[in-house]
Image (tube, rainbow, N blue to C red):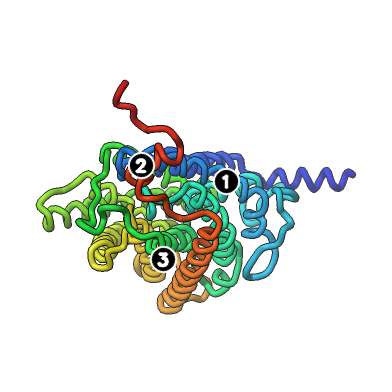
Amino acid sequence: MAHAQDQGESLASQINSGDTAWLLTASALVLFMTLPGLALFYGGLVRARNFLSIIVQCFAICCAASLVWAIGGYSLSFADGSAFLGGMQNAFLGGLATVRQGTTVPESVFVLFQMTFAVITPALFIGAFVERVRFGWVMIFSTLWLLLVYVPVCKWVWGGGWLAQLGALDFAGGIVVHTTAGVSALVTAMMIGPRQGFKHNHIIPPHSPALTMVGAGMLWFGWFGFNGGSALAAGDGAANAILNTHLAASMAALVWVGIERVKIGKATSIGIVTGAVAGLATITPAAGFVSPMSAITLGALGSTICFYAVQVVKHRFRIDDSLDVFAVHGVGGMLGSVLLGVFAVPALGGHGLGEQATMASQVTAQSIAVGVVVLWSAVVSAVIAWAVSLVVGMRVDQEAEFDGLDLHSHGERAYDFEQ
């Protein structure tokens, strides 16, 4: 008994209160990104009659993903198991260690922090098929997607799985979050088909750019926890990640409106916030590995490439990825993940590559990881979407789409202009 008590005290002494407090704060910041940040960012971009539906979907996905994570998602992602999937030792959050291995925080805090990532990732891809999908289909698809797409990839990259063993790096989710969500968004948008009116001009005006700007500000603010918290300690690593995050977003926002100014003669509110988000997505996988100047470069590259990716998806291929999830989050995340191998080298001010890695070998490992995750996300998402549609139809009928999902799916309106 005395030995067990001494062991418990020894483990407790490994817990750093500053690191623990920071990770708890970062968890709150990442949750804030979904509720209300992403909800308002997406909500302002849709038509007024669908605003409430976006907020409800984000809220409901948050609840469902949190429960799935607690029941088995965390264990399958991070518990000991194979190189492809974890075991069930921590199912229902049982058997958690006093201190998470490799950190100075309780495992319960690590669980909470990772839970907020599991919440925001499926919430990201709903932007691809807004204004036309059934609420029941969204919920079933999102829940299965979390288990069958997100959890395995999380294990492969962050849980010590086979891609991590290959040498792939992902500081805060360029592969695990943005690539999975972005690719799945594109696939589901193609399967569901475009909104009414999209084929005529490929642009459906947002009902409130002001709300979108407010939501974008919340996302930017929360991203400090997203990237900074991924250092898992309150120190120079977190500070460097947050500094890089801010600089990349700042550069990307200005580059996007600069391109707009040249192409259409105006710098738009939607453009500046979309550019910022593109920069945030691009720096995410590399935030803790690169220098501030490299972060600025990544922001510029990410914004430029994502801008033209939007044009290609919407205008060349005429895919109604309604809120540009693939072109911004997916392309940005993949770009940053691959370029991590370049900008993380010490010669460019980076903090070093994987053990015994060179620039060429790291870029190769990053590219393989991105390619594998793209393929896995696309195929599994398509299968899940099709299977769920056999039980619950994907799309509402034309009358419901015309009336809006607020009224059709929830029996309410976001705005009552008669009062």
Q: Earlier in the sequence, mark 1 or mark 3?
A: 1
| Drawn side of residue 215 relative to residue 160, left or right | left
| Drawn side of residue 137 relative to residue 71, left or right | left
Q: Amino acid at mark 2?
A: Gly
Assess disc 1: are there few (<14), some (14-19) or many (≥20) residues with their C-alpha within 10 Å of its C-alpha: some
Given residues 312 and 178, the one toward you in this image is 312
At a point 66% along the width and 54% down the height, the residue shown is 72
What is the spatial separation of the Cα atoms under label 1 and label 2, in whole angstroms? 24 Å
Given residues 212 and 3, the one toward you in this image is 212
The residue at the far right in this view is: 1
Q: Quadrant of residue 86?
A: bottom right
Given residues 137 and 206, the one toward you in this image is 137
The residue to which callout 1 is attached is: 64
At a point 29% along the width and 51% down the height, the residue shown is 274
The residue to which callout 3 is attached is: 337
What is the spatial separation of the Cα atoms under label 1 and label 3, in whole angstroms? 29 Å
The residue to which callout 2 is attached is: 404
Indicate the quadrant containing the N terminus: top left, top right, bottom left or bottom right. top right
| Drawn side of residue 206 relative to residue 145, left or right | left
The residue at the far left in this view is: 265
Q: Earlier in the sequence, mark 1 or mark 2?
A: 1
Q: Are marks 1 and 3 in contact (CB under 8 Å)?
A: no
At a point 31% along the width and 38% down the height, the residue shown is 48
Numbered mark located on residue 309 in the image: none
Mark nearest the camera among 3 and 2 is 2
Rendered position, 83 above or below 53: below
At a point 78% along the width and 45% down the height, the residue shown is 8
Q: Position of residue 385 (x, y in %)?
A: 49, 61
Rendered position, 159 above or below 208: below
